[in-house]
């Protein structure tokens, strides 16, 4: 137990100095070793109503909110419990399965409720009059997710400090107990979201028009030499296409442009005002998480949000086309966290090379 306590202290210190990005992930598996205390409510014959316990929890999260978890705990005690009548110490083993509901699953601090069924095995060290009782339990807990760098150090996708309390009610009997534990939850797998990196928009390159050389007229006697004025510079004509990723970020499952992500759109608006013949196609893209139909609609809403902002800032709506491609045009592999992060993007296809 001393080693387990030292591990907990080290992990907590690392959490203080590192930024965390973790959450409850749908489809993830969890393993939680724990230690704690066990209290009898006082309706047994006992010598010491307080003792320690240790055990293991293992579970699966169907969604970010809902999960299921199996558990086993062992309680060595000096208690002797009716109906075991030989006045010898009785050790207790608890086991069962619980349903969990997580509140605020995308935050760093996640509270949850638990309710379950299982059993309690009362074991006499001499093997005399061992008993099993069916039981139910209910309670709550709290998870504090640690930074990704800490989780990777322990070869887990997520790592959290966890505290639990349960009220245990053995049926067909009156021996109700309290279990309170602390542990470290290791999570593996599951769907996640990633923060999109900013990508600068490069303004179109404008080629300077070549200087106009005035022709030298032929001099005829006795007519004077006449030098015509320089011809006016031709109006720039746009002939080629280009593509650029916009630095526009949205909250998870939202199509509202986040505050602070208008710089690249404003830059594109300025270029379009300078070149009135320039048109753009604003394209929305997603990764492969979720259904194709849902991602198609989400990418279209995000492209429409960028178009609406540009129209509100003076660009004719007929010069902008908004189109959502969903997950159809990935630029990286969706099998990795980094690849999915690159695929969640907004691009602008523009005409921008200038011809004299």
Image: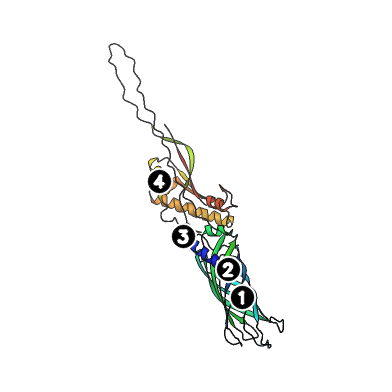
Please report contact status of discs 3 and 1: CB closer than 8 Å, yes or no: no
- For marks 1 and 4, give the CA distance: 57 Å
| C-alpha separation, residue under disc 3 versus residue under disc 1 | 37 Å
Q: Which residue is mark 2?
A: 66
Q: Which label was assigned to residue 267? A: 4
Q: Is residue 241 left or right of residue 79?
A: left
Q: Secondary structure at mark 4?
A: helix
Q: Going 47% across and 62% down the picture, which residue do you hit?
A: 16
Q: Which residue is mark 3?
A: 17
Q: Are marks 2 and 4 in contact (CB under 8 Å)?
A: no
Residue matched to label 1: 116
Q: Is 237 rendered above or below residue 281?
A: above
Residues at marks 3 and 4, CA–CA distance in whole angstroms: 37 Å
3 or 1: mark nearer the eye: 3
Q: Give the residue drawn at x 64%, y 74%.
A: 96
Query: Which numbered disc, 3 or 1, marks the residue that appears first in the sequence?
Result: 3
* Mark 3 element type: loop
Label 2, label 4: how far apart the Cα atoms are? 44 Å
């Amino acid at each position: 137990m001393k080693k387990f306590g030292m591990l907990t202290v080290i992990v907590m210190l690392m959490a203080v100095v590192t930024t965390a990005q973790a959450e409850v992930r749908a489809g993830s598996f969890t393993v939680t070793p724990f230690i704690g205390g066990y209290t009898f409510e006082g309706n047994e014959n006992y010598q010491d109503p307080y003792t320690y316990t240790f055990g293991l929890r293992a579970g699966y999260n169907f969604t970010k909110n809902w999960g299921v978890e199996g558990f086993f705990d062992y309680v060595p005690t000096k208690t002797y419990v009716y109906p075991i009548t030989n006045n010898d110490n009785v050790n207790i083993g608890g086991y069962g399965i619980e349903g969990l509901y997580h509140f605020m699953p995308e935050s760093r601090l996640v509270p949850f409720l638990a309710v379950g069924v299982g059993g309690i095995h009362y074991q006499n060290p001499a093997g005399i009059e061992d008993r099993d009782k069916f039981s139910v339990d209910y309670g709550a807990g709290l998870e504090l997710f640690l930074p990704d760098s800490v989780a990777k150090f322990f070869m887990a996708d997520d790592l959290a400090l966890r505290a639990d309390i349960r009220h245990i009610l053995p049926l067909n009997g009156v021996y109700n107990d309290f279990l309170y534990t602390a542990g470290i939850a290791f999570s593996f797998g599951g769907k996640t979201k990633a923060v999109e990196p900013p990508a600068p928009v490069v303004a179109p390159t404008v080629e300077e028009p070549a200087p106009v050389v005035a022709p030298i007229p032929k001099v005829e006697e006795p007519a004077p030499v006449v030098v015509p004025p320089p011809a006016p510079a031709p109006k720039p004509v746009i002939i080629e296409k280009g593509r650029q990723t916009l630095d526009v970020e949205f909250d998870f499952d939202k199509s509202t442009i986040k505050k602070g992500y208008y710089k690249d759109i404003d830059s594109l608006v300025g270029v379009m005002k300078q070149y009135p013949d320039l048109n753009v196609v604003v394209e929305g893209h997603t990764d492969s998480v979720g259904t194709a139909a849902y991602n198609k609609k989400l990418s279209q809403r995000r492209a429409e949000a960028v178009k609406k902002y540009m129209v509100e800032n003076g660009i004719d709506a007929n010069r902008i086309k908004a189109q959502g491609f969903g997950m159809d045009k990935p630029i990286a592999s969706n099998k990795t966290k980094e690849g999915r992060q690159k695929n969640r993007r907004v691009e602008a296809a523009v005409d921008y090379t200038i011809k004299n």
